[in-house]
Amino acid sequence: MTHFLRTLIASTSLIATLAVAADPLPLVDAEVRKVDTAAGKITLKHGDIPNLDMPAMTMVFQVRNPATLPPLKVGDQVRFRAEKVNGAYVASDIEPRR
């Protein structure tokens, strides 16, 4: 592999990494409606999700890390990030809303 090609690949990787870091998924306010630890799912009544072009509603999300579910309970006010992965809506970075 030529020096030029290695430099080009490294530069492209760096640009892609910076683009992802500069455009994180937005945090969305929500209320916990149901927690299904066994299935790794959570039902949230959420506000608008701009990155998914989704209006406020109540819906079920897969959870990226099911280990984050146990302390959550119905009625908790949270913030989370949402994305669509392989056709499924996925919630991550679920944190208490202050």
Image (cartoon, rainbow, N blue to C red):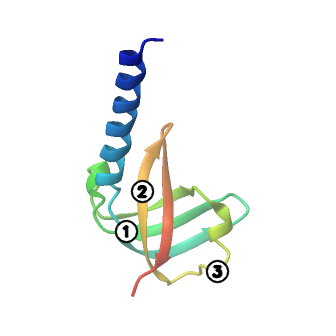
Q: Determine whether the residue tagged by mark 2 lies in a helix, strand or loop.
A: strand
Q: Determine whether the residue tagged by mark 1 lies in a helix, strand or loop.
A: strand
Would residue 23 be visible to someone looking at this image?
no
Q: Which residue is mark 2?
A: 82
In the displayed image of the protein, which residue is found farthest to the front? 3
Mark number for residue 3?
none
Query: Which residue is at 50% across, 61% downward?
Result: 92
Is label 1 or label 2 in front?
2
Question: Disc 2 residue type?
Answer: Ala
How many numbered dots are placed on residues in this image? 3
Q: Determine whether the residue tagged by mark 3 lies in a helix, strand or loop.
A: loop
Query: 97 and 24: which one is in front?
Result: 24
Question: Disc 3 residue type?
Answer: Pro
Lateral position of residue 5 relative to residue 35, left or right: left
Label 1–label 2 contact, CB within 8 A = yes
Q: Is residue 95 above or below residue 18?
A: below
Lateral position of residue 43 relative to residue 79, left or right: right
Query: 23 and 34: which one is in front?
Result: 23
| Rendering coords of residue 15 (x, y %) | 31, 38
In the displayed image of the protein, which residue is found farthest to the right? 38
| Rendering coords of residue 12 (x, y %) | 35, 30
Question: Disc 1 residue type?
Answer: His
- Mark 1 or mark 3, which is nearer the start of the sequence? 1
Would residue 19 be visible to someone looking at this image?
yes
Q: Which residue is mark 1?
A: 46
- Mark 3 or mark 2, which is nearer the start of the sequence? 3
In the displayed image of the protein, which residue is found farthest to the top? 1
Mark number for residue 71?
3
